[in-house]
Structure formats: structure tokens, C-alpha cells
Image (spheres, rainbow, N blue to C red):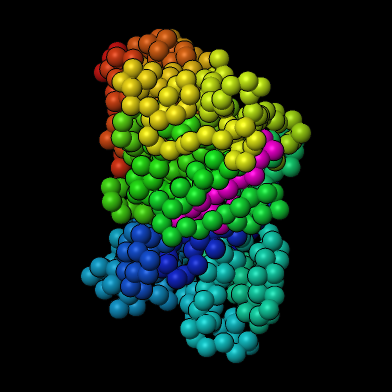
Amino acid sequence: MTTDVQILESAVVRFAGDSGDGMQLTGSQFTNSTALSGSDLATFPDFPAEIRAPVGTTFGVSAFQINFGAKSIKTIGDEPDVLVAMNPAALKVSLDNLRRGGLLVVDAGSFTKRNLQKAGYETNPLEDGCLEDYQLITLDASKQTVESVKEFGLGNKDALRSKNMYMLGLMLWMFDRSRAPVTDWLEKKFAKKPEIAAANIAALNAGHAYGETAELSTSIKRYHIGAVKQEPGLYKTVTGSEALSWGLAAGGELSGLDIVLGSYPITPASPVLHTLSSLKDLGILTFQAEDEIAAVCAALGAAFGGALGVTSSSGPGIALKGEALGLAISTELPLVVVNVQRGGPSTGLPTKTEQSDLYQAIYGRNGDAPLPVLATRSPADCFETAIEACRIALKYMTPVILLSDGFIANAAEPWKLPDMEALEPFEVAFASAPEDGEFNPYQRDDLSLARNWAKPGTPGCMHRIGGIEKSYDTGHISYDPANHQKMTDVRAAKVAGIAREIPPLEPSTGSAGARIGVVGWGSTFGPIEEAVKIARSEGVDVSHVHFRHLNPMPSNTDALLKSFDHVLIPEMNTGQLKTVIRDRFFIDAQPLNKVSGQPFKITEVLNAIRDLASEKA
């Protein structure tokens, strides 16, 4: 076996297997070891939509992809360089993603006649020549795992549960990663079952030893990927849901208010509830309600009581919250609404990603009911965007929708821990009794148009609240037509006025006035950014503009977008931002749409830029 080590700038590895094979755990532990080695990274856990599909079927394939390197990493990588396939179904589902000439590592022990039939193979792909375009390593990982843990007295079924650790050990050897973080994690996780920890560690070591000693083809090399040069500081690998939750917690700290989360479990938003429920020491109360309506109403009630209300869900749950969001707009109370988007409509693709709730966020309530809408662009960006959502909700006394999506929520990347002392606190002032006259809950700040916020029980601040329209002058119920017109206009003007303090929209790559402006929002940031950089290196005059504030948009949006000769909008829906842009600015933007449940590839955006540049030449 060759001892050569090939130096790479980056690599993409995909682990794929049955949903019971522990692929997410395998990928996360490979990620931890990679992060500790100093490489930059981006990950993509790809869950099956079925809760428990039949074992060995394509419906039950679970995958985890990681792109890591000694350079800045902004995407999960278009095509894996290495695919680890634990069974025939995993091979069938994932093979088309593997680049031609890539490395395919297969557990041959799982390619039984029965498993081949379940996956829909008529012949064994390991024997019929269909894998000739790839570098192939076949090993009986099942058999070797059982052999490696024999001394621990486990039954065959329990022994095979360590197979993922065997494959992980092999990959750690191949990419020169340390086993120590994984070993430490196993010892902690199974501290009460030391025999299980020992068996998994033995399997991990056996996989690593296989790489060291097996007579692999001389064309298969060991790879080394160094550390990336980063700004000095303390870094942590975070998922989007974690960073978003910590941003909400920071919003509570910066405002001096308690956070009350009312939520109902739903994929892929549930991790926000899980994370915030562990932060009780920061003044965070979490309430798992019996349904979506109760969840948002509880959060809104907390806001009435003087806390910062938060509710989280995905598109179907946001639909159920619609009437209560109208109530929040009418009562003008601060509420942060987190929508972790997934494929729809209806149940749709609960474990897959999409950006198809933008119409819902901007328009999806009865009556004229505008509210601010923000979107985060990456896992690390969730922290700052969540703080911004809290700040706007409190300063303008309004509900705010914060859009994430399934990709951002589950993906992970390194995040530099912020200096909390450097973050600007929010000023939150509760109303007190007027010196003369009756308290008016709809008396407003002259600039922000935010209404008074009085805690229940404040002497002299008794007032009526509810969904029926209130008088602008007194806060009492009013059916006066002119008053309703005025209240509707003022609520809209309050939201529109937020644009005064939104930073100007600027290209992240390129400059205003380019021939082509590629405009995005949300998790399309990485693929667009990389595609634009490649196109610019090819001589294409193109820039990238990315929105965080979608309603209202920055005040210079019209001028910036009209400075481009042509506008291309890639988004994971059928053209929702494109329609909003056309409606507001009369710009004939060209859409690039994808609703496959998978994030954009760099090449998909790059080819669209090339085509547009060629057409308009």
C-alpha cells in the first residue's frame, strides 16, 4: 500500500445509509473532529421524510454531507468527492451526486439478494460494471465490525449498530483526522453503559486500522486538508437552530426582558424549542402548547404582560397562527415569529428545504396587515438576524417574522463567538400613568409610531385590548370609518418607516452598475456568492446582492436594482421574490427556480449567469 499523502485544499464527503445506521451521528462526529483540526466547513444533514421507512428501502435513506477545507467554505459542495454507502439503497439514492472519478466506499456485506431487491436493483452493481467511472473500495464492514466487538459479548444485531463507527474510523484515517474527540464523546455518551462505549471505540479503531493495514489499491491515497486562516477568536460549530435560539436569548439579555416561547413541535422547527428549553437560567420560559394556535396566543399573552413573546413553527403551523398574527398586528405587541421553512404545500416534504413561504410572510393574513419580515442567510448569520428581529419588534411594537429554512436549521458551520459587551442594548420603556387625562394605549412615538406599552397592573394604565378596531385618540373600540382608515394607514406607515434605519443594500461581491445583478435571500447566499465569484473570474460583469430585510426593503433597493442591466433571482420556490420585486419596483427580473427539496448547486447558478450573459451579449 502506498504511504503517499495527497494535500488537498478542500473535499466533500457524503455518508449515506439506512435511517437506523446512524449517519447523522457519524457525520456530526466527523464534523467535530474536522472543526477541531481547524478546517472551515459546511454540513448538510439530509433526513428521510418517513418517520421509519422499511429497512433497506430508498425511502429510508439518511445522508450527511460535509464540505471542508483549508479555505473559506460557503456551500456544502456540488458533488461529493467521497461517498460512503452503507447499503444498496444508499448507493442507489446517492450515486448520481458523486463526481465522476470520485471515491466510493461500500459495505459489500450489506449487498445481499434481499437488500438489492428492496433497493430496486436487478443485478449487483458491485459486479455488473456500472461503477467503472468511480474509484471503488468494497469491504465487508458488517463482518469486520462484528469481529471487532466480539470480545464484548454483543449479539449480532447489537454488534452491527457499531458499523457506522467502523466506517467513521476509516474516514478519519483517510483524511488524517483525530479519533480522540470521537472517543471522548463516546465515553461521555455511554458513561452508564461502558460496554457499549468500549464496543463502539473498538469498531472505530478497527476501521482506522483497516485503512492503515489493508492492501488498498495504490490509486487510493490518504489525504490531508490543513487549517483555514481565520480571524483570531473563539469558534464553535453551530447549527442554524442553535445560533437562532442563542440570538433570541441575546435579544432578551440586551433588552432586559424575559423571553417566553410558545411553540408546538413541527419539523424542522422543533430544535428551536429544544435549545431554548435548556436556557432557563437566562430568563427564558418555554411552553409546549397543545396546538399552534395556543402556542402563538400564549406568546402574545406574554407580550401583553411585558415579556418578549416568541413563537416558532414551519409553514403549516404558521398558517394556523394566521388569525393570532392579525391580532398581534391589531394590538401592536412585540412578537418574534420564527418560520423554519420546509417543502409544501400541506405536509409536503417535512424534512426537506424550501423557500416557499415568502408570500405567506409578506401577504398571508386577512385584511391589510403588514409586518416586518427578515431572512437569515446561513447558520452563523442566524444569531445576528435573531437579535435584529427582537430589536425591531420591541422598538416598533410589532410582530416580526424571521425566516429560516430546513437547510439552515440543520446545517452547521464554524461561528466566532461574539463579544456580548460590544452588542448594543435595546431601550425598552414601559408606559406610566399620564399626569393629566386618561391613558391612551395608542398614543405613539412621533418618529417610530410605536404605541405605548403598559404592563398590566400599572396604576393609571388600565386599558382595553383586543382585535376589534380601536380609536386612534382614546384606545376605545371604534367603528368610525375614518378612524379605521387612519389606523390602517398608521400601522402600514410604522412598518414602512423601519426602512429609515435599515442599512443600505450593498453588493456582497461586485458593485452597483454591473451588467448582471444576481439577487437572493435566505440560504441561497453560499451558492450564489461562489457562482458570482467564478463568473467574475471568467470575465462576466456580474454582482451579488442579498436581502436580510424583505419587508420593508432597504431604502436604496430601487436605485441599486435598477443600476443593473439584468436581474437574476435564484430561489427555492416558483418565483416569489421575483414577483415581489416586479410588483414594487417594476423590474423584469428573471427567475431561477428550484423546488426539489435540495439546496442550489453552484453550477446551477453559474450556468444561469453564463446563459444570461450569452443571451444579452
Q: Position of residue 283 (x, y in %)?
A: 68, 49
Up-down relation of residue 60 to residue 383 (above or below) = below
Residue at point 64%, 57% (across, down): 278
Q: Position of residue 400 (x, y in %)?
A: 48, 34
Q: What stretch is highlighted in magenta?
A: 255-276
Q: Nearer the viewer, residue 453 or 99?
A: 453
Q: Position of residue 503 (x, y in %)?
A: 55, 19
The quadrant in which residue 329 appears is top left
Judge left or right: residue 167 versus residue 565. Answer: right
Judge left or right: residue 264 versus residue 483. Answer: right
Whether 264 is among the magenta residues is: yes
Q: Where is residue 195 in the image (x, y as percent from the top left)?
A: 66, 82
* Number of numbered discs overlaid on the protein picture: 0
Q: Which of 265 and 369 is in front in this view?
A: 369
Q: Which of 367 and 269 is in front in this view?
A: 367
Residue at point 66%, 40% (across, down): 257
Whether 485 is among the magenta residues is: no
Residue at point 60%, 56% (across, down): 277
The residue positioned farthest toward the front in the image shown: 437
Judge left or right: residue 121 versus residue 234. Answer: left
